[in-house]
C-alpha cells in the first residue's frame, strides 16, 4: 500500500522541512504487529498509535520519493535543494511556477554555460524583456612563426549586457548583475547597463 503525498507541503516556507501531517495514517500500523497477549492492552495501543502518527510522514516521503525528484511536484524546499544540485540560479523574487520551470530546464542550459546563448536563455524568460550582449572575445592567428615577445597584449576579456528590465529600477539591474555573474566565466569582467 502506498501512502498519499500531501501536496500542501509545497506551500511551506523555504527550509521548513517535513513535519507531522494531520490525519495521515501509516500503511503499516504498529498495533497490528503486536503479539496476541498485548493486543488488548489500551496503554500499548495508544502508545503505538502515537508512534504511527510520527512515523507516517517518513513513510509517505519514502513511498512518494519519485515525486520529490520531479520539479513539477516536489515541495518548494526540495525544489530549491534540487536547484542547488543542478546549479540552477534560484531567485527569491520568482513565483513558484518560474522556479519550477527554471529547475526543470537547468540541465538543458548547462551545456551552454559561459556562452552568449547561455546568458540569453537564462535571462530572457524571467528577468529582462530585451537583452544585447557584447563580448570582447577574439582570436589572432599568423601564417608564419612569430616571436611571442612581439605579440600584442591581449585586452581584458569583458562581457557587456545592455538590458531592458521587466521592472524599472536599480534593484533590477543589481539582480540581473548578480545572476549574470554566476553565468560568465570567472576570468571575464561583467558590466550590466539598463537600456531603453
Image (spheres, grey):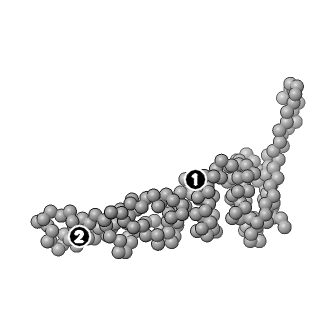
- The percent position of residue 142, horizontal first and vertical second, equals 87, 30
Which residue in the protein does label 2 denote?
47
Q: Secondary structure at mark 1?
A: loop
Depth-wise, is mark 2 or mark 1 nearer the camera? 1
Q: Quadrant of residue 182?
A: bottom right
Which image quadrant: the N terminus?
Answer: bottom left
Does residue 2 appear in the picture of this structure?
yes
Q: Quadrant of residue 60?
A: bottom left
Q: Secondary structure at mark 2?
A: helix
Decide: is 157 above or below 32.
above
Which image quadrant: the C terminus?
Answer: bottom right
Left or right for 110, reference 12: right
- The percent position of residue 79, horizontal first and vertical second, equals 53, 61
- The percent position of residue 61, horizontal first and vertical second, equals 40, 62
Q: Residue furthest top?
A: 145
Q: At 11% across and 65% down in the image, what residue appears?
A: 37
Q: At 65% across and 52% down in the image, what residue appears?
A: 109
CA neighbours of label 1 inside 10 A, class few (<14), some (14 to 19), many (20+): some
Which residue in the protein does label 1 denote?
86
| Measured Cα–Cα span from mark 2 to mark 1 | 43 Å
Left or right for 175, reference 21: right
Q: How many marks?
A: 2
Q: Residue furthest left?
A: 37
Q: Pointer 2 and pointer 1: residues touching (CB < 8 Å)?
A: no
In this view of the protein, which residue sits in the foreground, 184 or 123? 123
Left or right for 106, reference 25: right
Q: At 19% across and 69% down in the image, what residue appears?
A: 44
Amino acid at each position: 500500500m502506498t501512502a498519499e503525498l500531501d501536496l500542501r507541503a509545497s506551500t511551506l516556507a523555504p527550509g521548513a522541512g517535513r513535519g507531522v501531517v494531520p490525519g495521515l495514517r501509516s500503511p503499516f500500523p504498529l498495533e497490528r504487529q503486536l503479539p496476541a497477549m498485548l493486543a488488548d492492552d489500551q496503554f500499548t495501543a495508544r502508545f503505538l498509535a502515537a508512534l504511527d502518527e510520527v512515523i507516517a510522514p517518513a513513510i509517505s516521503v519514502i513511498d512518494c520519493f519519485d515525486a520529490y525528484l520531479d520539479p513539477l511536484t516536489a515541495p518548494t524546499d526540495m525544489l530549491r535543494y534540487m536547484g542547488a544540485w543542478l546549479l540552477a540560479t534560484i531567485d527569491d523574487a520568482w513565483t513558484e511556477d518560474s522556479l519550477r520551470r527554471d529547475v526543470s530546464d537547468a540541465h538543458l542550459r548547462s551545456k551552454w554555460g559561459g556562452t552568449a546563448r547561455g546568458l540569453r536563455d537564462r535571462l530572457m524568460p524571467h528577468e529582462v524583456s530585451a537583452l544585447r550582449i557584447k563580448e570582447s572575445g577574439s582570436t589572432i592567428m599568423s601564417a608564419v612563426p612569430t616571436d611571442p615577445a612581439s605579440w600584442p597584449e591581449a585586452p581584458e576579456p569583458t562581457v557587456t549586457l545592455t538590458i531592458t528590465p521587466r521592472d524599472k529600477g536599480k534593484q533590477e539591474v543589481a539582480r540581473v548583475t548578480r545572476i549574470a555573474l554566476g553565468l560568465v566565466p570567472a576570468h571575464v569582467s561583467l558590466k550590466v547597463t539598463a537600456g531603453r
